[in-house]
Amino acid sequence: MNKSAQTRIWASIFSAYPGRIGISRTFEGFGQRDEPAMIAFGEALTFQTKIGRAHIEKRSRELTQALIAGLKKIDGVRIWTSPDPARSVAVLSFLPGNLDIRKLSAALYQKDRIGCATRGGQDRPGLRFSPHFYNTHADVEKTVAAVKKYMASGV
């Protein structure tokens, strides 16, 4: 912050633990730690340990392979992810023909409640799905059907 403006700015947060030097004494403070998130993180690790990391990985690979198999059947889809199960766990990237990936991503989320990420640029642009152990085969089938619908009708 510009030194000449510092005296004209009022602090909006007051904390028991202000910053240590200069203007940080006025404008920086440590608020309440996000203890619920910290507790939840520990619980999530306990839950994953009960399921077993190997089981989670196996399930993620299984769902990814099902998604690859479904998307391969759609004309115009180009899959970037390796079809080798040893090299494709829980992440699948593909190019949906000539569809605008931003519009497709938005339509999938808003109309079909399917979340994905977009990947731009010249090197393997497209959409990225991340099927994981908490997803179901019904989720995979719904995703394939939605992509097929938009590939046929546009976005």
Image (spheres, grey):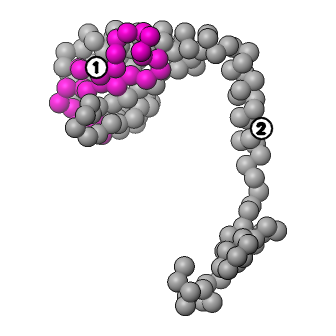
- Left or right of residue 83: residue 86: right
Q: Quadrant of the C terminus?
A: top left
Dot 1: element: strand
Q: Where is mark 2, residue-wise?
A: 39
Residue 121, position as x, y percentages in the image: 26, 40
Residue at position x 21%, y 32% in the image: 99
- Callout 1 amino acid: Ile
Check contact, mark 2 vs mark 1: CB within 8 A.
Answer: no
Q: Is residue 48 visible?
A: yes
Of residues 103 and 83, the one nearer the viewer is: 83
- Left or right of residue 51: residue 134: left
Q: Is residue 111 visible?
A: no
- Left or right of residue 55: residue 39: right
Residue 85, position as x, y percentages in the image: 42, 9
Quarter of the image where one finds residue 87: top left
Does 99 lie within the magenta span? yes
Residue at position x 60%, y 14% in the image: 56
Q: Where is mark 1, residue-wise?
A: 79
